[in-house]
Image (spheres, grey):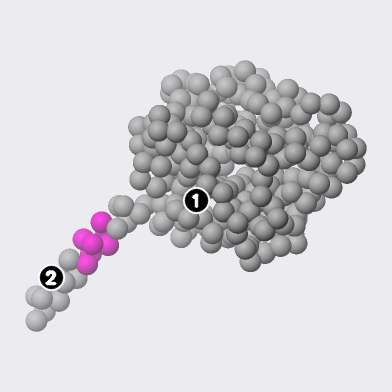
Amino acid sequence: MQRVMLALMLASLVLLQGCLGGLRDSVTDALPEQRGIPGGLTLACLSSAQFTDMVIEIDHAPGYAPEATTVELLIDRLSDVCDKPNGVKAVITETSFDQDGSWSADDVRAQALEHREAPPMDGTTLRWHVLFPSGGYDDDNVLGVAVNAADVAVFRDSIDDAENILQRPNAEDIENSVTLHEVGHLLGLVNLVYTSPRDHEDPDHPGHSSNEDSVMYWAVESSSLGAIFSGQLPDDFDDDDRADLTDLASGDLDAEQQLWRP
Ligand SMILES: [Zn+2]
């Protein structure tokens, strides 16, 4: 009898390990501290060694669907800088979040986890996740946030408020730039998981570009952008951002705090 029990226990242990191996990221999802920092899946995007395609999962509150131009911009830019031979696509889902009004970073993490369709590392698919909720961030100067290695949120209500200050740039342009800016943080920009040999991080705004022609310029995610950009908002990475990504992809630049390595 005891032998049978032991055999059963061993069998279930093997089964459990098998599951853990196959569902590594479900396990990390269960432990918030292990879901990584923005930039923790940079190499997973820049390499096709495991993840040959990419899904941008977009979950939006009713009435908060992103602009088509925002979705196109994300696909274009990620296809350009990441190595995904089987393509980058967006999957857009209307979602009822259990939260509106004011969001903290923890709220974004919890709702992202709750509504995510699959883990970030899903077989050969890398999945990044963009939330478009109603309401705004704790700090109402913030238009978008990146909260861990795969999750960002963009606050359209706050963007509409920012637009109302000057009427230009308009809300669609702001949404384009803010969303790409947050996804740029998932790519580790600027200096989030590496130290660039190029001097382009703004010392007064760590993690951001000092170049106002880069989408990673610090003011892009801030409601003060209306006061700074009277015309065109940046909607692309600049040469320094791209050079950082090239060096990270080649291994010339060390990437730290990675959840996955080639
Ligand atoms: Zn930022």
Element assignment for label 2: helix
| Residue at the image position 74 percent from the left and 49 percent from the top | 156
**Residue 104 coordinates in the image, percent (x, y):** 69, 57
Quarter of the image for residue 230 reads top right
Q: Is residue 175 above or below residue 135?
A: above
Span shown in magenta: 12-18
Image quarter where the N terminus lies is bottom left
On the rendered structure, is 52 left or right of 174?
A: left
Marks 2 and 1, the one that precedes in the sequence: 2
Viewer-closest of 5 and 180: 180
Label the magenta part by its dominant secondary structure: helix
Tell me if residue 87 comes above or below residue 93 in the rendering.
Answer: above
Q: Is residue 246 left or right of residue 147?
A: left
The reply to whether residue 104 is visible in this rendering is no
Q: Amino acid at mark 1?
A: Arg
Give the label on residue 7, or none: 2
Q: Is mark 1 within 8 Å of ligand 1?
A: no
- Secondary structure, mark 1, is loop
The answer to whether residue 174 of the structure is visible from this angle is yes
Q: Position of residue 118 (x, y in %)?
A: 44, 53
Q: Residue at x 17, y 66 (%)?
A: 10
- Classed neighbour count for the residue bearing mark 2: other residues with Cα under 10 Å, few (<14), some (14–19), many (≥20): few
User: Circle 1 is placed at which residue position?
Assistant: 35
Between marks 2 and 1, how big is the CA–CA gap? 34 Å
